[in-house]
Amino acid sequence: MKCKAKFVFGFLFLNISVSFIFSSAIPISTNQTNANFIEDLSYKNQEIINFRKEVHDNIRVLKINDTVNLKWRKYKIKKEDNFYKIMSVTMLDHDTISTVNKLNSAYETKTEDIWLLPNVRGMAILKKDKNKFIDKYGVSKNLFFNIPENHDYLFVPRVSKIRINNNKKQISLSDFIKPAKGIISSNYGLRDDPFLKKKKFHKGIDIACPKLSPVSASESGKVIFSSAQKDYGKTIIIEHENGYQTIYAHLNKILVKKGNLIQKGEKIGLSGKTGKSTAPHLHFEIRRKGRPVRPRF
């Protein structure tokens, strides 16, 4: 059965289709050896006091970094309870409670059912949708957690809109790093083409390095191409902020896939001499808005 779940990063509303296998309650265990059980929803209950503080602290921390102290609690629904009371007392929200506990609606609050409650707002997604979620929303890989006794799903804490906007820094040429170790055997600009035997503009640089040398991402970004290309051989193209792209050509092996989010310095391939090449090396280009620019290292 399928439904639409809305996931909100702070004030940013994001829509994602999530498949659920609905039931009134799920089997409960926890990642902790002794999971605390919330006995009642009284604001004087020490477990509720602790829980609300943890939720508040996690909201604050997630505005700064990808650290979250995730803990799970259990709560058995009482006759006088309803969905919105539980939501209010725990400081959680509709998406968090309903997706983690596979609820069709807020009216599936049945007495004696046991709900699982995380101490941070977020939502449950299918494990198979993890990469799509990362690609679409740029959520850190560190923010996906297993849900106790729910092996097909992952829990994703909510990242604030402030964090998302602050992470989108305006990069410049000086931010790019050299993607492989070795000397620059052919520089950017006019050069003697080894095949045409005449002057031709070289759009990038060639880094001389032995075959199978590690090649790293020059800057963080998203892989938009990872396959063979005429003349360039096995090639990776990464898209970055501020209109930049980097190209890594003549590779022997590609270690990333189209759509992957890559961190600066992360290993993405091994050097080689595929395509139109006279010897093992890495051909590297930086382009801005489609035009080649000279690297600054």
Image (tube, grey):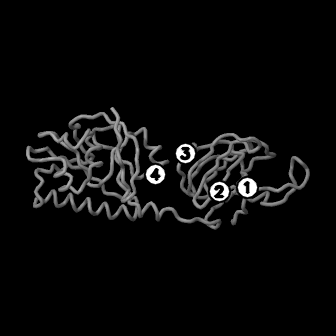
Q: Measured from the top left, where is residue 198 in percent x and y?
A: 91, 53
Question: Which residue carries the number 4 mark?
Answer: 137
Residue 204 falls in image quadrant? bottom right
Q: Which mark is residue 179?
A: 2
* Residue farthest toward the left in the current orientation of the protein: 79
| In this view, 102 is above or below 194 | above
Q: Nearer the viewer, residue 209 or 155?
A: 155
Comparing labels 3 and 2, the label whose residue is closer to the camera = 3
Assess disc 4: are there few (<14), some (14-19) or many (≥20) residues with their C-alpha within 10 Å of its C-alpha: few
Assess disc 2: are there few (<14), some (14-19) or many (≥20) residues with their C-alpha within 10 Å of its C-alpha: many
Mark positioned earlier in the residue sequence (1 or 2): 2
Question: Which residue carries the number 1 mark?
Answer: 207
Comparing labels 1 and 4, the label whose residue is closer to the camera = 4
Q: Measured from the top left, where is residue 220 in percent x and y?
A: 56, 57
Question: Which residue carries the number 3 mark?
Answer: 259
Mark positioned earlier in the residue sequence (3 or 1): 1
Q: Amino acid at mark 3?
A: Gly
Mark positioned earlier in the residue sequence (1 or 4): 4
Q: Amino acid at mark 2?
A: Pro
Q: Amino acid at mark 4?
A: Tyr
